[in-house]
Image (cartoon, grey):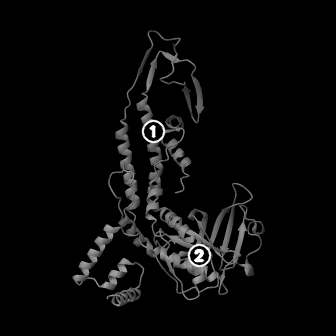
Amino acid sequence: MYSMHENDVRQRLVQAVGSTRATAWCQTPDMTSNPAWYVYSQLAALYREIPEVRPPDGGEDAAAALSESGHWQLAQRLQRDTLALNDHYVRVDITDDQEPSTRLIPPDLVEVVTHPLRPSQPLSVKEWIPDPETQNKWVKLNVDPRNRIYVALDDRGNDVSDRILGGNFSGENYPWVINEQAVLPYVAYHSSMTGYPLDPYSGREVFEGALQLGVLYSFFQHTVRNVAWAQRYILGAEPLGMDVEEEGEGRRAEVEADPATLLALRPLEDIQGQPMIGQWSSPVDPSTLLASIERYERRITEMALGQVGVSRRESDVRSAMSLAVSRESQRQAQRAYEPVFRRSDLRLLRLVSGLMGGPTSGWRINYKSIPRDAAEMAAEMDRMSKLIEAGLLDRVSAYQQLHPGLSRQEAEKAIEEIAKINRAYAA
């Protein structure tokens, strides 16, 4: 998801064809195809526009502070990684200036303990962070509000809280307290409710396919090069100046050869007869190979999109926009993911507000749908007008469909206000 998987592709390439042939194929594996990153970036549309937070009385300062901290811009990355990895965590801290700070934590760096009846939200968390003073070592942050524990442990289990945290923050010094109750500063985000605190394996096929595409496209580059310069053979002779290199488990003889240079040959000592030189034609048609790889890529993409029932804009995978999710499909994905992300966002808002001394109940949040273009809006208005005329839809429900997240009471009030203004300016 962060385009840092070159070594993974390289290892997959060596596993597929061996180290000698992998080196002959390419020095750097092909990294141009990454359907996992592209698809999940397209589906993460819930925070394209900053959501509308409706705080309770007394919570305005906390809502404004969270927005000014840049969290809702960070939430775009949060949703993308949550959809890709199935789970993600956000840690909340309040700075000395009483400003909230949020930090994203991938699920492979946490160990969580949850209530058996409420597995979606952790009770305690162990988080691994890089040791700021020693490379290639990790420090474990143990946060347990039930026992008011917040300590940092090195890889040997020694308490290094003074060096990492700057002091002792357990017991009475526990930093996250709301209404004299110790709380956990982590909020869990999930792509779907599974009944488990973590879901590490669902959707792994998409990432396996992305790694395999790196191998296939590397082979395609090798094939194109072979077609441009066919494989040659020599019987009874050998090139002059040939070097032998050992790489991995194989040995390889190399000589610089180019159409612009003269290749010098010499007959073998034990050869009888005339040496022979020729070349083979390529056994693979590059266009046929590319079409097969693209069909494989299409299958991986459809597998990723099938998790939420959306489809690509067009069927030709060779188009630059073929992997783009249509606007209506993005809105469908928004509606599909909205309930589970709203649950976590409300927990985050209550946590931030409580740590800042504000209210912890009465918070609401509405997500803004991807705007419709003129053609989409005209078609939607025509559909709603016909349903209203047929008596199959009332104006309040229609207004709610145009403004997702509004309650029926709020929609009724908005319609009444529109009618009132229209009557006042009817003349």
Total tally of numbered discs in the picture:
2
Q: Extreme front residue here? A: 427
Amino acid type assigned to the residue bearing label 2 in the image = Leu
Rendered location of residue 123, percent (x, y): 60, 76
Q: Above or below — where is 273 with respect to 177?
A: above
Residue ID for mark 1:
221
CA–CA distance in space, label 2 to label 1: 48 Å
Residue ID for mark 2:
66
Q: What is the quadrant of residue 336 in the picture?
A: bottom left
Q: What is the quadrant of residue 183 in the picture?
A: bottom right
Amino acid type assigned to the residue bearing label 1 in the image = Gln
Q: What is the quadrant of residue 93 in the picture?
A: bottom right
Most foreground residue, 155 or 78: 78
- In front: label 2 or label 1: 2
Q: How many neighbours does mark 1 have within 10 angstroms: few (below 14), some (14-19), or many (20 or more)? A: some
Rendered location of residue 259, percent (x, y): 47, 23
Residue occupying image coordinates x 46% and y 71%: 194
Most foreground residue, 345 or 241: 345
Tell me the SS state at disc 1. Answer: helix
Residue occupying image coordinates x 37% and y 27%: 281
Which mark sits nearer the N-terminus, 2 or 1? Answer: 2
Most foreground residue, 99 or 115: 99
The answer to whether residue 119 of the structure is visible from this angle is no
Q: Is residue 176 left or right of residue 64?
A: right
Q: Above or below — where is 216 with respect to 403?
A: above
Q: Are marks 2 and 1 in contact (CB under 8 Å)?
A: no
Rendered location of residue 52, percent (x, y): 49, 78
